[in-house]
Amino acid sequence: MTSWFYSLQFRLIVGFALVLAVALGSVSVYAGYAARQEVDSLRIDTDRARAFRLEETVSDFYSTNKGWAGLQSVIERAGFLSGREVLVLDEVGDVVADSRGNRGHRNRADLPKHRFSPIMFGDRRVGEVAIGSEDASQRRGGFELLGRPGPEDAVDRFLEPPLSRFAQAIHQSLLWAGLIAGAGGILLVSLVSRRTLTSVRELKSAALQLGLGDLSQRVPARGRDEIGQLGRTFNSMADGLESAERQRRHMVADVAHELRTPLSNIQGYVEAVRDGLLEPDSATLGTIHQQVVYLSGLVEDLRLLAETEAADFRLNRKPASLEEAIRRSVEAFRPRADAEGVDLVAGIEGELPLVNIDRTRIEQVVGNLLENAIRHTPSGGRVTISAKVEDAATVAVTVADTLPFVFERFYRVDPSRARATGGAGLGLTIAKQLVEAHGGALRASSAEGEGSEFRLELPLERGPD
């Protein structure tokens, strides 16, 4: 679970959540601010339009009735319908109508905080009117009354602002907020993704160079997320490719070296026979045949090695007796050991169960180990092969000799030995490949002056009883 918090998925989730939170917060704050501003503007414009209509109503009343008699009931209805306090003063400043029904005697001196607009009849000032923005009895309990709209409002002074203006303002604020939030989100995403994209670009460049043949390419493996793991995997792959390429070049050079000597020998003998320097007798033909046999064996080893390394290599596995495979190999090499003066000893501890193996290939592995051991054990020495069940899952076969252990291709302990007896050095490599194809392992240990020990471990899969 802890590794998930370092994953690229988690980082992307956190990054997008942060971007979304910033975007939504920006839209909410800006849209809320714009809505409040527009509501205040609408309220002010609405109050002005209504105030102007009430002033016109009061002026028309005076023009029609030639006085203020009966104005109180009109003002009370107007105040009730508009929700605003309306005060009307006559030409001497006494209150003649109050929308709140306050009939007590008051004049302009009692209303110092009120702003009044004049009421004209012709050229004569006949009174004043003050219209509040809200009904004090319902809201704050105190306010400043609105005066008459200025000349700049004369065109639309009767009209209240439409609600569509509010909707349009909200739409515009949302648009601007979205654009700003989007730009901020893009900037935030670019900052969050910068490190990841830098690693991806490094991987892309290194992969391109690797594809062009530069196997020395490596990338910095930073972080514990998928990009960091990908970088480490890329470096591991590049190490493998570089190692494989190095081995391929060595193998080509070794194959050329191994082929050159016997071919040169064959060419020399054939040219000598052709020129009459040698008689084509049995000895000469035997030497040429020996070189041809060596070449044939080398080519077969190379073919088998290529086959074991192929991706489609398959084993013909079935339950078989490992003890029988060992005894067959020992009997096959006993004459060779006797001829070399080497004592070949086999020891099987207990009864070995049936194991799911390709018997032919395992016999080949055991044969390669025995051949190496016999070839490099001096006359009078001993080669011991033993087998036993290690535990419930493993059976082990051990070959002990005096050979320093090496798995490299074309390795020979004593370079002075002739190729006819020394071998090409592919046996151990082929044996290792075949054992690993069985899911096992081939290990070696060596002590100077005491010889080497090869240990073949195979998974124990019991066959039917």
Image (cartoon, rainbow, N blue to C red):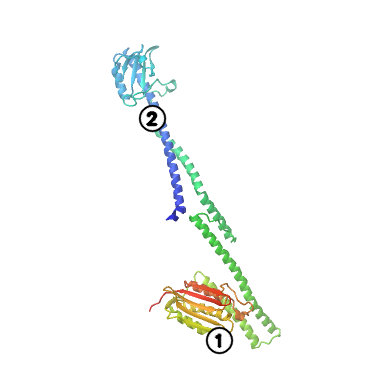
Picture layout, residue 11 above or below residue 28: below
Under circle 1, the secondary element is helix
**In this view, 226 is above or below 272:** above
| Image quadrant containing the C terminus | bottom left
Q: Residue 366 vs residue 89: left or right?
A: right
Residue 312 location (% of width, % of height): 49, 70
Q: Position of residue 451 (x, y in %)?
A: 56, 77
Kind of residue at badge 1 = Asp
Q: Categorize mark 1 by other alpha carbons within 10 Å: few (<14), some (14-19), many (20+).
A: some
Q: Residues within 10 Å of mark 2 (few under 14, many from 20)?
A: few
For residue 302, which quarter of the picture?
A: bottom right
Residue 20 position in % (x across, y down): 43, 44
Q: Could you tell me which secondary element the residue under label 2 belongs to?
A: loop
Q: From where the camera sits, is residue 110 visible? A: yes
Which residue in the rendered view is the most extreme toward the bottom? 281
Quadrant position of the N terminus in the picture: bottom left
Question: What residue type is disc 2 on?
Answer: Pro
Left or right: residue 177 compared with residue 401: left
- N-term mark: 2 or 1: 2
Q: Is residue 168 visible?
A: no
Most foreground residue, 415 or 177: 415
Whole-Å distance between the Cαs marked 2 and 1?
116 Å
Location of residue 16 with respect to 298 vertically, above or below: above
Q: Residue at x 37, y 14 (%)?
A: 109
Residue picked out by circle 2:
162
Mark 2 vs 1: CB contact within 8 A = no
Q: Nearer the viewer, residue 395 or 299?
A: 395
Image coords of residue 13 (percent x, y): 44, 50
Image quarter of residue 71: top left
Question: In this figure, which residue is indicated by the disc labeled 1?
Answer: 338
